Structure formats: C-alpha cells, structure tokens
Image: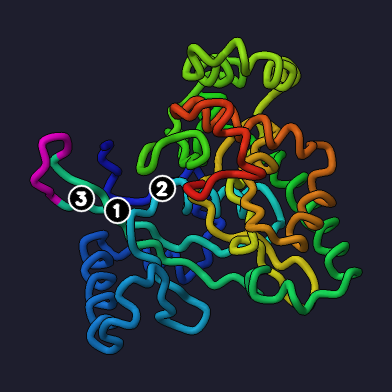
Amino acid sequence: MATHSATFRPPIDLWKHVPFLGRLWLAVPTRIRLSLYRFIWWAADRIYPGRLRTTRVRRILPGIYLKFGQIKASEPHGMVLLRRHTNLYSSIALDYVPYDIPVENESIDHFTKAFLLMTTARGKPLCAVEHELTPDQVTTIGLELRDYLSEMHTIPNPYKYGLCSSAGGELDAPLFTMQNFDLQTFDDIRSFHAWLRERMQRHWPVMQPRVQPIFSKYDVQQTVFSHGDLSTDNIMVHDGRLAGLIDWETSGWMPAYWDYVCSRWNRSMVFQTILKLAIPEHSDKEKYEMVISAAVSQGMEPESAATFEEAPDWW
C-alpha cells in the first residue's frame, strides 16, 4: 500500500479557495492538528460510548464536521477541484491529515488512516426525503443534476494519466475491482478497455459482441471528471431542489458513461427517474453490459452474471 504524504497538497494554487479561517488553521503544524483530531475522536468515544464508535463522521462545531477512517486523498482533492473550477455546491475540504498505522502482516507493514475536516453539506440525502417529493420536484432535481454534472465534467485534468483519481493516482472503483483494491491508472480510455478485455480472457468471444460496440464508441473520446458513486446517499436535497453532491472518494477522470454505469440504484424508482433525466444519453443496456463485463472480469461466468438485473450486492 502506498504511503500518503503527511499533509494535504491539492493541485497548485487551490488553497486560495479554502475559507480564510481554514487557511489560518492550516498554518498550525500538522502534528498539532493531528493530535487535536485524535483527542476529539477519543473524547467523543468517551462521551458517547459504543453508540458512535463506528461512525465515520462527527459534528464538532456548528457547520463543521470531522471524518475519520481509511479516507483516500481523492475525497478532499475532489471537493477542492469542484470549488476551484465550478460554482457547484458540496462540502468544503478544510484539512486532510493521513497517517500510517504499523501492522504485523507478511504482505504489508502498515495501513493508512486519515482525518478529514470539512464544512457541512446543505440539505438531506435523497434517501431521507424521496418519499416526500412531488413528481414536479423529482423532475426539477433530475434536470438540476444534469446541469450539475455537465459543469462538473468540464473540470480539467492536471495530471499525466488520462484515467485517474482526483488526486492523480489509482481510482476507487468498487464495480471493477476486488474489495480493498483500487483501479490502476491508464493513459486513455482505449487502454482501460484493453485491460478490461484482457481480464475477461476466455470469455471474450462471448462478451465481445456485447461490449465491443460500447468500447469502440468511447475509445476515441476524452475522459470527463466524474463523481463515481451517484446514489440516494450522496445526492443532497433541500426544499425539493438539488443541494449538491457529497462523498468524493470515487471521483476522477473516467469515460463519459462512468457516472451512469457506476450509479447505485438501490431499487429506488425516484432515483432512477432522476438519473434518467440527468443522464439521458446513456442507456440501461449500456449500464447492464458494462456491469456484466465488470463481473466477468473478476471471475464470474457470463451466464451467472447475466442473472443480475442490476449490480450484485458487493457493488
């Protein structure tokens, strides 16, 4: 596992978009900030024993939250890039401090955890309010999400890899990788499709007529900045309107179909309606075939993979 740097270093000049008080806090030495975050987490466990021990996000001040766990650098980078290049709403990353924890294991000698300090996101998750929305509000949210994604897709890629995370490295892509592994970087979309084809190996003769048209369509296109995990948990709604997106760990530059293919429907008809309004250029068949190819690339038989109406439970 790669070792993260001791401090959060987003692409050049982006710190000017962090609020002033946040920049003052960042002037404090990293070891002091890390010690305070650890103390806050320790104190919260004492004040709320058991009940909050597995919670990854805690409110520590009005409008300020602290997140703790195996948080990839792509999450704060994604939020900073959004603030730097667009007028879109989301949480604002104020600080990101990763640190290594030694472990006794033959394959690795440490794993990395991190604290992420950020502002709150306005509204509530779609899953909490979807039963209250009127048909007109659902339509409004879908069209607003379309505009949101269109603006988000224009964020330029400052890194050398065509396909990579918002931090410029490997991508958190659970659909295409085994648990706890990231998707490697690629020079372009054609290289990613070649990798996927190679992983299908003996099943390629069966899969080729199903996915080659999709591969050919996107091989010649440029990647776009994608969220990578659209779901009822990550779409925020306020007063029947889109309030923004949260959870940017899976963000990066990927094929244009990425947000539709990797969306988690959870059998929510409201979310499916919103997604189809937001991304009408991609079809359910395209999503289905790419999900099947992802399953086959990880060892599943095409016949077994084809029994899923949507992504399997591990996605």
Instruction: Tell me which amino acid carries mark 3.
Output: Asp
Instruction: Tell me which amino acid carries mark 1.
Output: Pro
Q: Residues within 10 Å of mark 1 (few under 14, many from 20)?
A: many
Instruction: Tell me which amino acid carries mark 2.
Output: Ala
101 in relation to 175, above or below: below
Residue 40 is left or right of residue 189, and the answer is left
Cβ atoms at labels 2 and 1 below 8 Å apart: yes
Report helix, strand or loop for mark 2: loop
Residue 149 is left or right of residue 178, and the answer is right
Q: Residues within 10 Å of mark 3 (few under 14, many from 20)?
A: some
Q: Position of residue 173 (x, y in %)?
A: 50, 39
Q: Residue at x 73, y 75 (%)?
A: 238
Q: Position of residue 268 (x, y in %)?
A: 70, 61
- Quadrant of the rendered image containing residue 197: top right
Q: Earlier in the sequence, mark 2 or mark 3?
A: 2
Q: CA distance from mark 2 to mark 3?
A: 14 Å
Q: Which residue is mark 3?
A: 100
The answer to whether any part of residue 158 appears in the image is no
Q: Residue at x 26, y 59 (%)?
A: 30
Report helix, strand or loop for mark 1: strand
Q: Is 90 in front, or is 124?
A: 124
Q: Which mark is residue 241?
A: none
Q: Is 182 in front, or is 272?
A: 272
The span picked out in magenta is 102-108
Residue 208: in magenta span: no
Cβ atoms at labels 3 and 1 below 8 Å apart: yes
Q: Which residue is mark 1?
A: 98
Q: Which mark is residue 73?
A: 2
